[in-house]
Image (cartoon, rainbow, N blue to C red):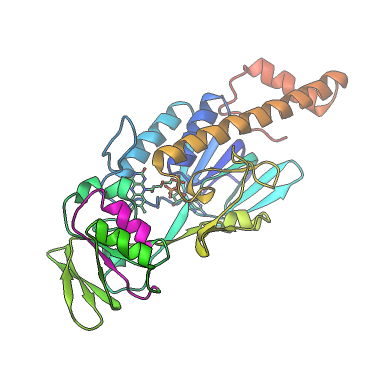
Amino acid sequence: MSDMNKRYDVVVIGGGAAGLSGALALSRARRSVLVIDAGSPRNAPASHAHNYLGREGTPPLELLAIGRAEAADYGAETVRGNVVSAEKLSDGFRVVQEDGSAVQARRLLVTTGIVDELPPVEGLAERWGKEVLHCPYCHGWEVRDRPVGILALSPMAVHQALLWRQWSDDVVLFRHEQPDFSDEEYEQLAARGISVVEGEVAALEVSDDEVTGVRLAGGAVIPREAVVVQPRFTARSAVLESLGLVPAEMVMGDHVVGTYIAADPAGATDVPGVWVAGNVANLMEQVVGAAAAGLKAASMINMDLVTDDTQRAVEARRTPFSAEAERQVTERVLGDRRHGLQETR
Ligand SMILES: Cc1cc2nc3c(=O)[nH]c(=O)nc-3n(C[C@H](O)[C@H](O)[C@H](O)COP(=O)(O)OP(=O)(O)OC[C@H]3O[C@@H](n4cnc5c(N)ncnc54)[C@H](O)[C@@H]3O)c2cc1C
């Protein structure tokens, strides 16, 4: 359980690629950092993480373990926990975990990611991240040249089918419950050798721990080794909502793809002192992009703290016998390394 009175420069909520990258940069900037992480990164069901330059094909949890160790080398602390809310104080934030413990922070970096909401097709959730896929850049190479089925769940289905055709010439599009496609779309599908299967999809056929086919409501089974879906991407935004931030809808055409928390390009939200990075702010971000966003937010948070530190120093200089001046003298005497300093201001 975290120390109730402990106050950090930055508490990072969520220890995926975005959060750990932010924690690494902030701890290297000599900020005191606590990462609170529930331990369920979005890509955990996948066996390997791809397109992360320098670590191509590393298992997702291993990649994060490496990141935690790197951040810890510079003094960042990481704890396993689930943050349920955060509250704005006159000077910073109070962050409350599920177990009732709380810590304080001058600034917050929230990197809680998203939930992939899957359609209620029998057998689909169990195979998610294995043979049930959404992102060709994450999994396309692994299923290249194999029989791929696209389960139409949105008006983006034809686009998905044409995209996955880049990895396999055996792509079947299941229209399921979607409205009929346009003549132009049928022409594009035919030109690329993609056939369309009519009828509601009832279940996935699984044998020896692998998807073998797609079963229609009428009973017919179409052999497939991978099935592509378009989940609804829902921001894990409860903590941000407790601070007054409201998730926005991401819309493509008329279709709601998911929800996210709006922020400026560096991740600053409408609540001063609160930054977001990774999937919670950008639904399309992949691991390397989430890590980059965490770094960008961290540098802006550090700059914001530098501004705050300078303002406090100027005030202390003007009133040499204030509590702030005393704090700064203590800090100078102890050395300017701030890790381990328990601040009470
Ligand atoms: C099946 C699958 C496979 C994928 N494969 C790849 C791939 O190969 N390559 C690639 O680049 N991308 C891949 N992705 C995308 C990748 O998962 C995301 O880009 C990446 O995880 C985003 O990182 P993040 O830090 O924003 O969020 P996440 O990695 O999801 O991390 C968020 C963390 O915050 C924690 N958390 C959430 N709420 C709280 C809370 N209230 N308190 C404390 N902690 C909390 C979570 O438990 C989690 O550990 C894949 C996605 C899926 C679904």
Residue at the extreme right: 319
Q: Position of residue 197 (x, y in %)?
A: 25, 72
Q: Nearer the viewer, residue 296 or 181?
A: 181
Give how far across and how far down residue 191 sits, in percent.
26, 57
Where 219 falls versus 228 (above or below)?
Answer: below
Q: Is residue 228 visible?
A: no
> Would residue 76 be counted in the magenta stretch?
no
Q: Nearer the viewer, residue 253 or 68?
A: 253
Q: Residue at the spot x=44%, y=31% of the render?
A: 72
User: Taking 22 as reference, is 65 left or right?
Assistant: left
Residue at the location (68% across, 26% down)?
306
Residue 237 visible here: yes
> 234 or 112: nearer the eye?
234
Is 303 situated above or below 225?
above
Instruction: Name the quadrant containing residue 276.
Output: top right
Residue placed furthest toward the bottom: 218
Where does the magenta region start and end?
157-178
